[in-house]
Amino acid sequence: MLYLLISFVSFILLSKSFTHHKPMLQTWENNLRLISLKFWSGSSSFLQKNWISLQPITSKLKKMVTSGSNVEGQREERETSLSLLDLPDLALGCILEKLPPSGLFSMAAVCSSLWESCKSDHLWDNHMKHKWGTLIGPAAYRQWQLHVASRNRTRHYCLKTRKKGLMESLAAIILPSTWTTLPQSVTCVCNCKVKGSSHSLPVHSIMSLYLSLESGKFWFPAQVYNREHGNLGFLLSCYDAQLRYDSRTNTFQARYSPYGRRVVEENIPWDRLRAAPVDTPPYKLHVSDCLHDLKPGDHIEIQWRRNNEFPYGWWYGVIGHLELCNGNVNHCRCHYNDIVVLEFRQHTPGSRWRQMMINRKDNREEGNEADGFYGGVRKLYNDEEIARWKRLWPSQVLE
Protein backbone atom coordinates (compact mmCIF):
# COMPACT_ATOMS: atom_id res chain seq x y z
CA MET A 1 0.00 0.00 0.00
CA LEU A 2 2.92 2.38 0.82
CA TYR A 3 4.47 1.61 -2.51
CA LEU A 4 1.31 2.63 -4.30
CA LEU A 5 1.11 5.91 -2.42
CA ILE A 6 4.75 6.87 -3.22
CA SER A 7 4.28 6.03 -6.88
CA PHE A 8 1.10 8.10 -7.12
CA VAL A 9 2.68 11.18 -5.51
CA SER A 10 5.69 10.93 -7.81
CA PHE A 11 3.34 10.83 -10.77
CA ILE A 12 1.58 14.05 -9.67
CA LEU A 13 4.91 15.91 -9.10
CA LEU A 14 6.18 14.91 -12.46
CA SER A 15 2.99 16.06 -14.21
CA LYS A 16 3.19 19.48 -12.53
CA SER A 17 6.77 19.99 -13.57
CA PHE A 18 5.80 19.84 -17.24
CA THR A 19 4.34 23.33 -17.15
CA HIS A 20 7.55 24.88 -15.70
CA HIS A 21 10.24 23.16 -17.79
CA LYS A 22 9.15 23.07 -21.41
CA PRO A 23 12.68 22.73 -22.84
CA MET A 24 13.18 19.50 -20.98
CA LEU A 25 9.89 18.05 -22.24
CA GLN A 26 11.44 15.27 -24.28
CA THR A 27 13.61 14.10 -21.38
CA TRP A 28 10.66 14.05 -19.03
CA GLU A 29 8.58 12.10 -21.52
CA ASN A 30 11.17 9.37 -21.62
CA ASN A 31 11.43 9.26 -17.86
CA LEU A 32 7.62 9.28 -17.56
CA ARG A 33 7.37 6.19 -19.73
CA LEU A 34 9.81 4.37 -17.48
CA ILE A 35 8.01 5.48 -14.29
CA SER A 36 4.58 4.57 -15.68
CA LEU A 37 5.76 1.12 -16.62
CA LYS A 38 7.22 0.60 -13.17
CA PHE A 39 4.03 2.03 -11.54
CA TRP A 40 1.61 -0.25 -13.38
CA SER A 41 3.81 -3.31 -13.06
CA GLY A 42 4.19 -2.67 -9.33
CA SER A 43 0.54 -1.92 -8.74
CA SER A 44 -0.60 -4.97 -10.69
CA SER A 45 1.67 -7.26 -8.71
CA PHE A 46 0.48 -5.58 -5.51
CA LEU A 47 -3.19 -6.09 -6.40
CA GLN A 48 -2.57 -9.72 -7.31
CA LYS A 49 -0.84 -10.39 -3.99
CA ASN A 50 -3.35 -8.47 -1.84
CA TRP A 51 -6.64 -9.10 -3.68
CA ILE A 52 -7.99 -11.40 -0.99
CA SER A 53 -7.29 -8.86 1.75
CA LEU A 54 -9.01 -6.07 -0.26
CA GLN A 55 -12.22 -8.04 -0.86
CA PRO A 56 -13.78 -7.27 2.57
CA ILE A 57 -13.19 -3.53 2.01
CA THR A 58 -14.84 -3.72 -1.43
CA SER A 59 -17.91 -5.56 -0.13
CA LYS A 60 -18.32 -3.05 2.71
CA LEU A 61 -18.24 -0.17 0.24
CA LYS A 62 -20.92 -1.86 -1.87
CA LYS A 63 -23.13 -2.39 1.17
CA MET A 64 -22.74 1.24 2.21
CA VAL A 65 -23.79 2.45 -1.24
CA THR A 66 -26.72 0.01 -1.42
CA SER A 67 -28.01 0.78 2.08
CA GLY A 68 -27.73 4.49 1.40
CA SER A 69 -29.88 4.21 -1.71
CA ASN A 70 -32.46 2.04 0.14
CA VAL A 71 -32.77 4.55 3.00
CA GLU A 72 -33.17 7.34 0.48
CA GLY A 73 -35.87 5.39 -1.36
CA GLN A 74 -37.76 4.60 1.84
CA ARG A 75 -37.61 8.25 2.86
CA GLU A 76 -38.99 9.34 -0.52
CA GLU A 77 -41.73 6.66 -0.34
CA ARG A 78 -42.77 7.84 3.11
CA GLU A 79 -42.84 11.44 1.93
CA THR A 80 -44.95 10.66 -1.16
CA SER A 81 -47.38 8.01 0.27
CA LEU A 82 -50.15 9.79 2.20
CA SER A 83 -53.35 8.22 3.52
CA LEU A 84 -56.80 9.73 3.87
CA LEU A 85 -56.17 10.07 7.58
CA ASP A 86 -53.36 12.55 6.88
CA LEU A 87 -55.90 15.00 5.44
CA PRO A 88 -57.43 17.77 7.55
CA ASP A 89 -60.88 16.97 8.97
CA LEU A 90 -62.57 19.47 6.66
CA ALA A 91 -61.01 17.96 3.52
CA LEU A 92 -61.82 14.41 4.65
CA GLY A 93 -65.40 15.44 5.39
CA CYS A 94 -65.80 16.93 1.91
CA ILE A 95 -64.58 13.67 0.35
CA LEU A 96 -66.93 11.52 2.44
CA GLU A 97 -69.89 13.76 1.58
CA LYS A 98 -69.32 13.00 -2.13
CA LEU A 99 -69.47 9.22 -1.64
CA PRO A 100 -72.66 7.29 -2.43
CA PRO A 101 -74.11 5.19 0.41
CA SER A 102 -72.45 1.96 -0.77
CA GLY A 103 -69.07 3.74 -1.04
CA LEU A 104 -69.49 5.30 2.40
CA PHE A 105 -70.27 1.89 3.86
CA SER A 106 -67.19 0.37 2.21
CA MET A 107 -65.03 3.22 3.49
CA ALA A 108 -66.36 2.65 7.01
CA ALA A 109 -64.99 -0.90 6.92
CA VAL A 110 -61.39 0.18 6.25
CA CYS A 111 -60.26 1.07 9.76
CA SER A 112 -61.37 2.34 13.17
CA SER A 113 -60.77 6.01 12.43
CA LEU A 114 -62.72 5.97 9.17
CA TRP A 115 -65.44 3.93 10.82
CA GLU A 116 -66.00 6.72 13.35
CA SER A 117 -66.10 9.32 10.57
CA CYS A 118 -68.30 7.37 8.15
CA LYS A 119 -71.07 6.51 10.60
CA SER A 120 -71.75 10.21 11.27
CA ASP A 121 -75.47 11.07 11.30
CA HIS A 122 -74.63 14.20 9.32
CA LEU A 123 -73.44 12.16 6.33
CA TRP A 124 -76.28 9.63 6.38
CA ASP A 125 -78.97 12.24 7.01
CA ASN A 126 -78.27 13.68 3.55
CA HIS A 127 -78.71 10.26 1.95
CA MET A 128 -81.90 9.63 3.95
CA LYS A 129 -83.48 12.88 2.79
CA HIS A 130 -82.43 12.35 -0.82
CA LYS A 131 -83.79 8.84 -1.23
CA TRP A 132 -86.27 8.22 1.58
CA GLY A 133 -87.54 11.71 2.49
CA THR A 134 -90.85 11.31 0.65
CA LEU A 135 -91.65 7.96 2.27
CA ILE A 136 -90.44 8.07 5.86
CA GLY A 137 -92.85 10.10 7.98
CA PRO A 138 -93.56 10.40 11.73
CA ALA A 139 -95.35 7.02 11.82
CA ALA A 140 -92.36 5.29 10.22
CA TYR A 141 -89.94 6.89 12.71
CA ARG A 142 -92.10 5.72 15.62
CA GLN A 143 -92.11 2.20 14.24
CA TRP A 144 -88.34 2.43 13.81
CA GLN A 145 -87.97 3.25 17.51
CA LEU A 146 -89.96 0.13 18.36
CA HIS A 147 -87.82 -1.83 15.93
CA VAL A 148 -84.66 -0.49 17.60
CA ALA A 149 -85.91 -1.46 21.04
CA SER A 150 -86.62 -4.97 19.80
CA ARG A 151 -83.17 -5.24 18.22
CA ASN A 152 -81.53 -3.99 21.40
CA ARG A 153 -83.13 -6.81 23.33
CA THR A 154 -82.04 -9.33 20.70
CA ARG A 155 -78.55 -7.85 20.58
CA HIS A 156 -78.20 -7.99 24.35
CA TYR A 157 -79.06 -11.66 24.21
CA CYS A 158 -76.57 -12.31 21.39
CA LEU A 159 -73.75 -10.58 23.29
CA LYS A 160 -74.33 -12.97 26.14
CA THR A 161 -74.00 -15.99 23.89
CA ARG A 162 -71.31 -14.92 21.45
CA LYS A 163 -69.63 -11.81 20.06
CA LYS A 164 -70.05 -10.97 16.42
CA GLY A 165 -67.73 -8.81 14.35
CA LEU A 166 -68.84 -5.61 12.66
CA MET A 167 -68.82 -6.94 9.12
CA GLU A 168 -70.50 -10.18 10.10
CA SER A 169 -73.27 -8.31 11.91
CA LEU A 170 -73.87 -5.88 9.06
CA ALA A 171 -73.82 -8.53 6.37
CA ALA A 172 -76.17 -10.85 8.27
CA ILE A 173 -78.60 -8.26 9.60
CA ILE A 174 -78.77 -5.12 7.50
CA LEU A 175 -76.38 -5.20 4.54
CA PRO A 176 -78.29 -4.76 1.25
CA SER A 177 -77.93 -7.70 -1.10
CA THR A 178 -76.81 -5.46 -3.98
CA TRP A 179 -73.78 -4.22 -2.04
CA THR A 180 -70.52 -6.11 -2.01
CA THR A 181 -69.97 -8.30 1.03
CA LEU A 182 -66.89 -7.11 2.85
CA PRO A 183 -64.28 -9.03 4.88
CA GLN A 184 -64.65 -9.22 8.63
CA SER A 185 -61.39 -7.43 9.32
CA VAL A 186 -59.47 -5.05 7.06
CA THR A 187 -56.11 -3.42 7.75
CA CYS A 188 -55.41 0.04 6.32
CA VAL A 189 -52.28 2.09 5.72
CA CYS A 190 -52.33 3.41 9.27
CA ASN A 191 -52.25 -0.19 10.60
CA CYS A 192 -55.69 0.20 12.20
CA LYS A 193 -58.11 -2.70 12.22
CA VAL A 194 -61.86 -2.97 12.42
CA LYS A 195 -62.19 -5.43 15.26
CA GLY A 196 -65.23 -7.31 16.43
CA SER A 197 -67.80 -5.94 18.80
CA SER A 198 -65.90 -2.81 19.86
CA HIS A 199 -66.95 -1.17 16.56
CA SER A 200 -70.55 -2.41 16.30
CA LEU A 201 -73.11 -0.23 14.55
CA PRO A 202 -75.33 1.84 16.89
CA VAL A 203 -78.86 0.69 16.16
CA HIS A 204 -80.30 4.15 16.80
CA SER A 205 -78.07 5.79 14.17
CA ILE A 206 -79.32 7.12 10.84
CA MET A 207 -76.84 4.83 9.11
CA SER A 208 -78.53 1.84 10.74
CA LEU A 209 -81.98 3.06 9.63
CA TYR A 210 -80.78 3.63 6.07
CA LEU A 211 -79.16 0.18 5.79
CA SER A 212 -82.23 -1.49 7.31
CA LEU A 213 -84.46 0.17 4.72
CA GLU A 214 -82.12 -0.73 1.86
CA SER A 215 -81.87 -4.35 2.93
CA GLY A 216 -85.63 -4.80 3.24
CA LYS A 217 -85.28 -5.95 6.85
CA PHE A 218 -87.41 -3.09 8.16
CA TRP A 219 -91.12 -2.93 7.36
CA PHE A 220 -92.40 0.63 7.67
CA PRO A 221 -95.82 2.31 7.37
CA ALA A 222 -96.61 4.43 4.32
CA GLN A 223 -99.46 4.86 1.85
CA VAL A 224 -100.07 3.33 -1.58
CA TYR A 225 -101.97 4.99 -4.44
CA ASN A 226 -104.42 2.83 -6.43
CA ARG A 227 -103.75 -0.26 -4.33
CA GLU A 228 -103.81 -3.82 -5.62
CA HIS A 229 -102.35 -2.91 -9.01
CA GLY A 230 -105.02 -0.35 -9.82
CA ASN A 231 -108.04 -2.45 -8.91
CA LEU A 232 -111.14 -0.59 -10.17
CA GLY A 233 -112.54 -0.49 -6.66
CA PHE A 234 -109.55 1.55 -5.45
CA LEU A 235 -108.86 3.99 -8.30
CA LEU A 236 -107.93 7.49 -7.09
CA SER A 237 -107.51 6.32 -3.51
CA CYS A 238 -104.53 6.03 -1.18
CA TYR A 239 -104.40 3.38 1.56
CA ASP A 240 -102.10 2.70 4.49
CA ALA A 241 -99.85 -0.33 4.25
CA GLN A 242 -96.72 -1.90 5.67
CA LEU A 243 -93.92 -1.68 3.11
CA ARG A 244 -90.49 -3.05 2.57
CA TYR A 245 -87.96 -2.31 -0.16
CA ASP A 246 -86.51 -4.75 -2.70
CA SER A 247 -83.14 -3.36 -3.81
CA ARG A 248 -82.86 -5.91 -6.64
CA THR A 249 -85.92 -4.57 -8.47
CA ASN A 250 -86.06 -1.06 -6.93
CA THR A 251 -89.70 -1.70 -6.03
CA PHE A 252 -91.70 -2.38 -2.87
CA GLN A 253 -93.84 -5.06 -1.33
CA ALA A 254 -96.98 -3.98 0.55
CA ARG A 255 -99.10 -5.71 3.16
CA TYR A 256 -102.66 -4.46 3.66
CA SER A 257 -104.73 -5.56 6.62
CA PRO A 258 -108.42 -5.01 5.83
CA TYR A 259 -111.06 -6.74 7.83
CA GLY A 260 -111.42 -10.46 7.04
CA ARG A 261 -108.36 -10.98 4.79
CA ARG A 262 -104.74 -10.02 4.35
CA VAL A 263 -103.64 -8.72 0.96
CA VAL A 264 -100.03 -8.66 -0.28
CA GLU A 265 -98.99 -6.62 -3.32
CA GLU A 266 -95.56 -6.76 -4.94
CA ASN A 267 -93.52 -4.74 -7.45
CA ILE A 268 -94.94 -1.37 -6.43
CA PRO A 269 -92.97 1.51 -8.02
CA TRP A 270 -91.86 4.62 -6.16
CA ASP A 271 -94.40 6.91 -7.86
CA ARG A 272 -97.32 5.05 -6.25
CA LEU A 273 -96.09 5.64 -2.71
CA ARG A 274 -96.06 8.48 -0.21
CA ALA A 275 -95.63 9.12 3.49
CA ALA A 276 -98.89 9.70 5.34
CA PRO A 277 -99.65 13.45 4.95
CA VAL A 278 -101.38 13.60 8.35
CA ASP A 279 -100.50 11.74 11.52
CA THR A 280 -103.88 9.99 11.83
CA PRO A 281 -104.06 6.19 12.25
CA PRO A 282 -106.07 4.42 9.52
CA TYR A 283 -108.88 3.44 11.92
CA LYS A 284 -109.28 6.91 13.45
CA LEU A 285 -111.39 9.82 12.22
CA HIS A 286 -109.26 12.71 11.00
CA VAL A 287 -110.12 16.03 12.69
CA SER A 288 -110.65 18.45 9.80
CA ASP A 289 -109.38 22.01 10.18
CA CYS A 290 -110.29 23.27 6.70
CA LEU A 291 -114.07 22.87 6.50
CA HIS A 292 -114.81 26.59 6.87
CA ASP A 293 -112.35 27.44 4.08
CA LEU A 294 -113.73 25.06 1.45
CA LYS A 295 -115.19 26.58 -1.71
CA PRO A 296 -116.05 25.26 -5.20
CA GLY A 297 -112.96 24.24 -7.19
CA ASP A 298 -110.85 23.28 -4.17
CA HIS A 299 -109.04 19.95 -4.36
CA ILE A 300 -109.49 17.68 -1.37
CA GLU A 301 -108.91 14.23 0.05
CA ILE A 302 -111.55 12.61 2.24
CA GLN A 303 -111.51 9.49 4.39
CA TRP A 304 -113.80 6.67 3.28
CA ARG A 305 -114.29 3.08 4.39
CA ARG A 306 -116.69 0.28 3.56
CA ASN A 307 -117.82 -0.23 7.17
CA ASN A 308 -116.66 0.28 10.71
CA GLU A 309 -114.46 -2.83 10.62
CA PHE A 310 -112.34 -1.56 7.73
CA PRO A 311 -109.56 1.03 7.82
CA TYR A 312 -110.03 4.39 6.16
CA GLY A 313 -108.52 5.17 2.78
CA TRP A 314 -107.97 8.68 1.39
CA TRP A 315 -109.97 9.47 -1.77
CA TYR A 316 -109.41 12.32 -4.18
CA GLY A 317 -112.23 14.75 -4.92
CA VAL A 318 -113.15 18.35 -5.79
CA ILE A 319 -115.54 20.76 -4.07
CA GLY A 320 -118.57 21.30 -6.31
CA HIS A 321 -121.49 23.76 -6.49
CA LEU A 322 -124.82 23.39 -4.76
CA GLU A 323 -127.77 22.36 -6.93
CA LEU A 324 -129.31 25.87 -6.88
CA CYS A 325 -126.02 27.53 -7.91
CA ASN A 326 -125.42 28.10 -11.63
CA GLY A 327 -121.66 27.94 -11.17
CA ASN A 328 -121.04 31.58 -12.05
CA VAL A 329 -118.01 32.72 -10.10
CA ASN A 330 -119.33 36.27 -9.70
CA HIS A 331 -122.62 35.12 -8.19
CA CYS A 332 -121.63 31.89 -6.40
CA ARG A 333 -122.50 31.84 -2.68
CA CYS A 334 -121.77 28.17 -2.06
CA HIS A 335 -118.87 28.87 0.32
CA TYR A 336 -121.29 30.63 2.71
CA ASN A 337 -123.58 27.59 2.95
CA ASP A 338 -123.20 25.01 5.74
CA ILE A 339 -123.57 22.20 3.20
CA VAL A 340 -120.47 21.29 1.19
CA VAL A 341 -120.73 19.30 -2.05
CA LEU A 342 -117.96 16.75 -2.68
CA GLU A 343 -117.56 15.57 -6.28
CA PHE A 344 -115.70 12.48 -7.45
CA ARG A 345 -115.49 13.20 -11.15
CA GLN A 346 -113.87 9.92 -12.09
CA HIS A 347 -117.43 8.51 -11.87
CA THR A 348 -120.14 9.18 -14.42
CA PRO A 349 -122.86 11.79 -13.66
CA GLY A 350 -125.78 10.08 -11.91
CA SER A 351 -123.58 7.40 -10.29
CA ARG A 352 -124.17 6.98 -6.58
CA TRP A 353 -120.44 7.52 -6.10
CA ARG A 354 -120.40 10.80 -8.00
CA GLN A 355 -121.43 13.18 -5.16
CA MET A 356 -121.53 13.36 -1.40
CA MET A 357 -122.68 16.20 0.88
CA ILE A 358 -121.26 16.97 4.31
CA ASN A 359 -121.91 19.63 6.94
CA ARG A 360 -118.99 22.00 7.39
CA LYS A 361 -120.06 22.70 11.01
CA ASP A 362 -120.25 19.06 12.06
CA ASN A 363 -116.98 17.17 11.87
CA ARG A 364 -118.15 13.59 12.20
CA GLU A 365 -118.37 10.38 10.21
CA GLU A 366 -121.32 10.29 7.81
CA GLY A 367 -122.72 7.50 5.62
CA ASN A 368 -124.41 4.11 5.74
CA GLU A 369 -123.71 0.42 5.19
CA ALA A 370 -124.73 0.61 1.53
CA ASP A 371 -122.59 3.56 0.43
CA GLY A 372 -119.85 3.39 3.02
CA PHE A 373 -118.76 5.97 5.58
CA TYR A 374 -117.06 9.32 4.94
CA GLY A 375 -114.71 10.77 7.51
CA GLY A 376 -112.34 13.73 7.81
CA VAL A 377 -111.34 16.07 4.99
CA ARG A 378 -107.98 17.60 4.17
CA LYS A 379 -107.62 20.42 1.65
CA LEU A 380 -104.81 20.17 -0.90
CA TYR A 381 -102.74 23.33 -1.11
CA ASN A 382 -99.67 21.85 -2.79
CA ASP A 383 -99.71 21.88 -6.61
CA GLU A 384 -97.48 18.81 -6.74
CA GLU A 385 -99.98 16.81 -4.68
CA ILE A 386 -102.80 17.82 -7.04
CA ALA A 387 -100.70 17.03 -10.12
CA ARG A 388 -99.87 13.61 -8.70
CA TRP A 389 -103.54 12.73 -8.37
CA LYS A 390 -104.19 13.89 -11.93
CA ARG A 391 -101.40 11.66 -13.22
CA LEU A 392 -103.25 8.72 -11.69
CA TRP A 393 -106.53 9.63 -13.39
CA PRO A 394 -108.19 6.55 -14.96
CA SER A 395 -108.20 6.23 -18.73
CA GLN A 396 -111.99 5.90 -18.76
CA VAL A 397 -114.85 7.20 -16.64
CA LEU A 398 -116.03 4.80 -13.95
CA GLU A 399 -119.64 3.75 -13.36
Image (cartoon, rainbow, N blue to C red):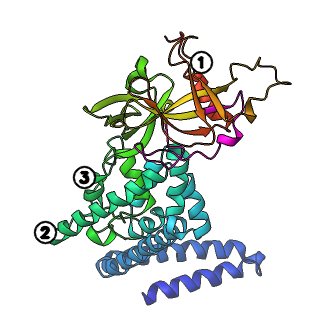
Q: Which residue is mark 1?
A: 345
Q: CA distance from mark 1 to mark 3?
A: 50 Å
Label ID, residue 161: 2
Type of amino acid under label 3 = Ala
**Magenta stretch?**
274-300
Of the two numbered discs 2 and 3 on the same chain, state the one appearing first in sequence. 2
Q: Are marks 2 and 3 in contact (CB under 8 Å)?
A: no
Residue 46 location, x and y as percent?
A: 37, 79
- The amino acid type of the residue labelled 2 equals Thr
Majority secondary structure of the magenta segment?
loop
Question: How crowded is the residue under tag 2: few (<14 C-alpha within 10 Å), some, or many (20+)?
Answer: few
Placement of 334 over or under 186, stated as above or below = above
Q: Does residue 99 appear in the picture of this structure? A: no
Q: Which mark is residue 172?
A: 3
Query: Up-down: is 322 above or below 246?
Result: above
Q: Identify the mark nearer the N-term, 1 or 3.
A: 3
Residue 64, visible in the rendered structure: yes
